[in-house]
Image (cartoon, rainbow, N blue to C red):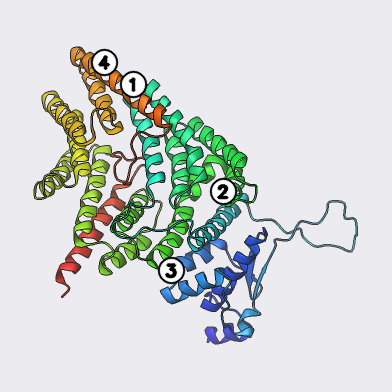
Amino acid sequence: MYKARFQKWGIEKKIKAEEAVEIFRQQTARAAAGKPTVAYIRGRRIDPDRLQRYRYRAAPLISKKIIHAEKGGDEESSSARMSQVVCRTPSPSPSPDTTDSNLSISPRLEEPTELRVPHECMQILQNFINGAFDSGLWQMQREGERAEMNGAFTWQHYVASSQGLIRHGRVKEGFSLLGLCFDQYKLQLQRPDSMFWLATYKCAMVLASQNNKLGDAFIDYASKLTALILPPGHPFNQLWSRVVLTGLSGIKDHAGAIFESYLDMWGRHVNSRETNTTNDVQGAFVFIQLHCTGLLSFNLLETVIQAMIAGKAISREAAEFLLQETKFRLALSYLTGRRLKKAETTTREIMTWLGSQPANDYTDLRCKAAWLMFEIKERKGTQAEALRAGHELLKLSQDIYGPAHIQTLEAMSAVESYCRKIGATGGAEQMGQDFESRWRIFRERADSCQNFPQQIDQPWYYRSIELGEKVGYVEETVDLFERCLKLSDDSP
């Protein structure tokens, strides 16, 4: 009865597909003209968050219609239905000088900045992604070619490594590396790859998690550099002009919505193209990492991973590898929570799997598992076992990466720090001297090429938790991969 009355009165609780498509079409056109938008259906204002939730949950056919509409395509819609959709600029408040006693209109309030900014950022990013793929600025590489997303991963990796050096007592070298990262940001800004903005946003959060002043300094530096290098109308300048309004608190509060919106749109484009396996696995790993941090919903992660495995975008071998990488994150989460027994059990599971693989495969994961075992033994307080694990880590790092690679240098700083902690001063002094001589080689190479000495091809090189991953989220991701692999085994 109530549904019939609602229909008669023009009141409907759900957003209809054609109405959503029309709203996104109008929003995109208005954003291109620099106009903010509020949307109404049958006179009722539509909450931006509700609209974004609709988009995430939309069926594939509706999603395609939305993308088509945002690109300017025409959709056949009921004129009666479309007459109920109104998108316009938020009304300004009446002038304070108004004195007409007959005018008694309540001033219209603008959306609070903390609600308006993330919504506008999502619109800008969506338009930017569409344009970058459609114009050929971003091209996901074909099988056998180098992956497209290396720049952002390299830069993000070195930012995280600088924080690792600082934590291990190598403060001067850590800040020297961070300075190099700031210098290289200009290069990334001029030639951004498809993960650049996410790496930028995440960097601000990582630095702020160590020290709010570092996060603020990076935001100030990045926004001013962007204004100097890029034209005022460039999407990155539009983004920074909004992000600085909310500062660090806004970045943290709305990171999940912005990451999810960005990756949702990125995934739609990637899924419509033939790409190489490395690109697909890299993309999947970014989804995993952000979900484990609580910045991406499980529904979106599950949809992406199931589609990738079922559609063979990632092979069974790649899915097995991603399962082990997720177990690595689980062991790290256990370690962070001082659940040492669980951390060691999970690490040994990873090592057992690695033992069944060819010796030269998955070298990064082998090194990270050695890192884990060293840190577990260190926290258990078993000095002899911890020192043995530390020396095994150093040997493995040198064999895999070389003596002056940033991975090896960070491992040296960790073992040196531990030796000083337990009073093994002789070993610590020798290791400190070795570190400093290798660090000079690293800096000479960086200065010579005016860039990072080593390029990081994969997002999973770095072995620490950067943004406080939640054990429950990581456990459900492990469960997701195990279920998907079992379904893959059971399918004909």
Marks 1 and 4 sit apart, C-alpha to C-alpha, by 11 Å
Closer to the eye: label 2 or 3: 2
Image coordinates of residue 93 in percent, x first then y, are: 77, 56
257 lies above or below 387: below
Dividing the picture into quarters, in which one does residue 450 lie?
top left
Q: Earlier in the sequence, mark 2 or mark 3?
A: 3
User: Would residue 472 be found to the left or right of residue 265 on screen?
Assistant: left
Assess whether mark 3 and mark 1 are in contact (beta carbons under 8 angstroms): no
Q: Earlier in the sequence, mark 1 or mark 3?
A: 3
Give the class, few, some or many, for how many residues have Cα within 10 Å of label 2's Cα (few <14, many ≥20). Answer: many
Identify residue for label 4: 433
Please tell me which residue is depicted at 54% across the width and 83% down the height of the picture.
2
The local secondary structure at tag 3 comes to: helix
Identify residue for label 1: 440
Identify residue for label 2: 236
Give the class, few, some or many, for how many residues have Cα within 10 Å of label 4's Cα (few <14, many ≥20). Answer: few
Closer to the eye: label 1 or 3: 1
Image coordinates of residue 117 in percent, x first then y, are: 59, 52
Marks 4 and 3 sit apart, C-alpha to C-alpha, by 56 Å
User: Would residue 231 be found to the left or right of residue 359 on screen?
Assistant: right
Marks 2 and 3 sit apart, C-alpha to C-alpha, by 28 Å
57 lies above or below 238: below
Q: Out of 107 and 113, give the one closest to the viewer.
A: 113
463 lies above or below 91: above
The local secondary structure at tag 1 comes to: helix
Identify residue for label 3: 57
Q: Earlier in the sequence, mark 4 or mark 2?
A: 2
Assess whether mark 3 and mark 4 are in contact (beta carbons under 8 angstroms): no
Please tell me which residue is depicted at 26% across the width and 22% down the height of the picture.
417
Q: Earlier in the sequence, mark 4 or mark 3?
A: 3
Give the class, few, some or many, for how many residues have Cα within 10 Å of label 1's Cα (few <14, many ≥20). Answer: few
Q: Out of 150 and 379, give the one closest to the viewer.
A: 150
